[in-house]
Amino acid sequence: LCLEKNYELPDGQTITIGTERFRATEILFRPTSMGLDSTGLGPMFDIAIQRSSKDLWPTLYANIVLSGGNMMFPGMAQRIEKEVKQSAPPHVKVGVIDVENKNFLSWIGGAILASTSEFSEMCITKDEYNEHGP
């Protein structure tokens, strides 16, 4: 594993980055390493899943879908799977789904939802929002 990697910037200048490549993403898993009082990604998956009905746990653990720009770092899917397996109940299968265009999945999901006939029932008017708030 080579720690250093060269990157060419838009202006043509080349820079070399070493351990920064790993330290930046490590904060997502170990926020305390930067003095942050926050939970890392691995336990966050467990917390979210275990707040659901226990009979859904196997399905949720087996279908973790990576979405968003931070999930585009190399090796992210493998690292998340490793982290979640460490804290998941021993009887469940952990599956991480790593798809292309993960930085657009939220937008795509929203577009699909908006195209369903049920979507209009989920919407509220501006007056309803102003009356009841967020």
Image (cartoon, grey):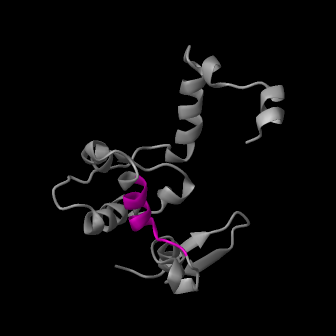
Q: Could you tell me which residue is drawn at 52 percent across and 77 percent down? A: 31
Q: Verify whether residue 43 appears in magenta.
A: yes
Q: Could you tell me which residue is drawn at 26 percent across and 63 percent down? A: 85
Please identify the quadrant where the N terminus is shown.
Answer: bottom left
Q: Nearer the viewer, residue 78 or 16?
A: 78
Quadrant hosting residue 12? bottom right
Q: Could you tell me which residue is drawn at 56 percent across and 13 percent down? A: 117
Note whether 119 is above or below 47 in the view shown.
above
Q: Residue furthest top?
A: 117
Q: Which residues are magenta?
A: 38-48
Residue 26 visible? The answer is yes
Note whether 107 is above or below 22 in the view shown.
above
Q: Position of residue 8 (x, y in %)?
A: 62, 68
Q: Position of residue 42 (x, y in %)?
A: 39, 66
Q: Nearer the viewer, residue 17 or 36?
A: 36
Residue 18 visible? The answer is no
Q: Position of residue 68 (x, y in %)?
A: 54, 51
Q: Verify whether residue 35 appears in magenta.
A: no
Q: Could you tell me which residue is drawn at 40 percent across and 52 percent down? A: 51
Quadrant hosting residue 6? bottom right
Q: Nearer the viewer, residue 63 or 12?
A: 63
- In the drawing, does residue 17 fall left or right of residue 91? right
